[in-house]
Image (cartoon, rainbow, N blue to C red):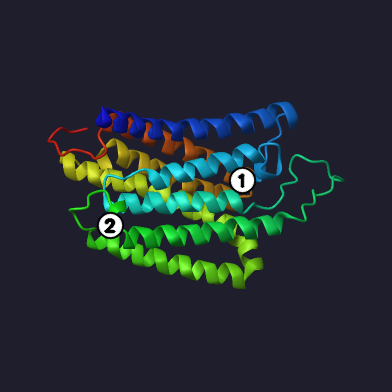
Amino acid sequence: MEDNNARQTYLALRFAMLLLATLLAVSIAAQVVFIDSFCTLRSISAYYHTSVRGVFVGALCAIGVCLVVYRGNTDRENVVLDHSGFMAFVVAFVPTEFDRTCTSAGSPVPGNPGLADAVANNVGALLVVALLAALAAWLLPRVRPNRDVPPSGFAKGALVVTLTLLAAGLVVFFTWRDLFLRYGHATAAILLFAGIVAVVWLNALDFAAKRSVSPWRNRYGATAVAMALTVVGSVVLYQLGVPHAVLAVEALLIIEFSVFWGMQTVELGTSEVRAATTTTA
């Protein structure tokens, strides 16, 4: 009974990721259709400054929790998932600049004098809790998946790097606050998307190793290549001055990651780890 409950919770966690992405998409669509008269902003993050804000912050934080809680097939995948989950919180807590695309030329930029204080409070709390979580993962054996099996060398190294970066992040955040407010959102968003592309590629490698197929010729490898081409294409469009290049790449990457997540859910079923087999794909 307990095993079945754990499997159902595992599947629900995976399904929740897809629902949260859909929630954000529906909320943005409602803003575009019913409020902005089919005008679209230049990025998904720009919808923080609209009526979508609650869903934007809530969905990103929930997705961040799912990514951190979910256990990857390998230590490397798990570390990258945790990295992406943390960055999702930063993207949610540090807003991008106000986008005037869907406002008239004379409309004032909405003032929010408490925004800097909110960012300081939220991100400061996030960094402290993340540092405590990393310390707990290092010091408390009972938080490990298997108490009888010590963490791998890679996992230990990743924790050391994580602790170092979080400590440095606290120093940077409290010392150069203006720099963080200016570039924090864009940097976190880039690192978040880089992380999810890396997760897909790591699955391509793991799938290839366990199924005796090329990483370039399996479903995950194809998805990773599509995501890489999406990023390259968006950079070209951005350099050409296409106004919604950022929105396009964000939307496509989210769709592509959702496709990957769905494929992986179907493949793994109720198993947490990909089994080795000679079956090709």
Return the x and y of residue 142 as percentages of the image width and height: 29, 53
Above or below, 174 against 223 in this view is below
Tell me whether circle 1 and circle 2 mark residues in contact (CB < 8 Å).
no
Q: Who comes first in sequence, dot 1 or dot 2? A: 1
Picture residue at 62% right of the left edge, 42% below the top: 244
The label shown at residue 141 is 2
The label shown at residue 45 is 1
Judge depth for marks 1 and 2 and give the one in front: 2
Return the x and y of residue 90 as percentages of the image width and height: 55, 54
Q: Quadrant of residue 5?
A: top left
Q: Neighbour class for label 1 at 10 Å: few (<14), some, many (≥20)?
A: many
Return the x and y of residue 119 as percentages of the image width and height: 64, 57
Q: Quarter of the image containing the N terminus?
A: top left
Q: Secondary structure at mark 2?
A: helix
Spot the residue most to the left.
Answer: 278
Report whether 146 appears left or right of 159.
left
Q: CA distance from mark 1 to mark 2?
A: 38 Å
Amino acid at pointer 1: Ser
The label shown at residue 244 is none
Picture residue at 47% right of the left edge, 48% below the top: 231
**Front residue of this view, candidates 108 and 166:** 166
Report whether 6 appears left or right of 25.
left
Q: Quadrant of residue 185?
A: bottom right
Return the x and y of residue 210 as percentages of the image width and height: 17, 42
Q: Secondary structure at mark 1?
A: helix
Above or below, 3 against 129 in this view is above
Picture residue at 59% right of the left edge, 43% below the top: 57
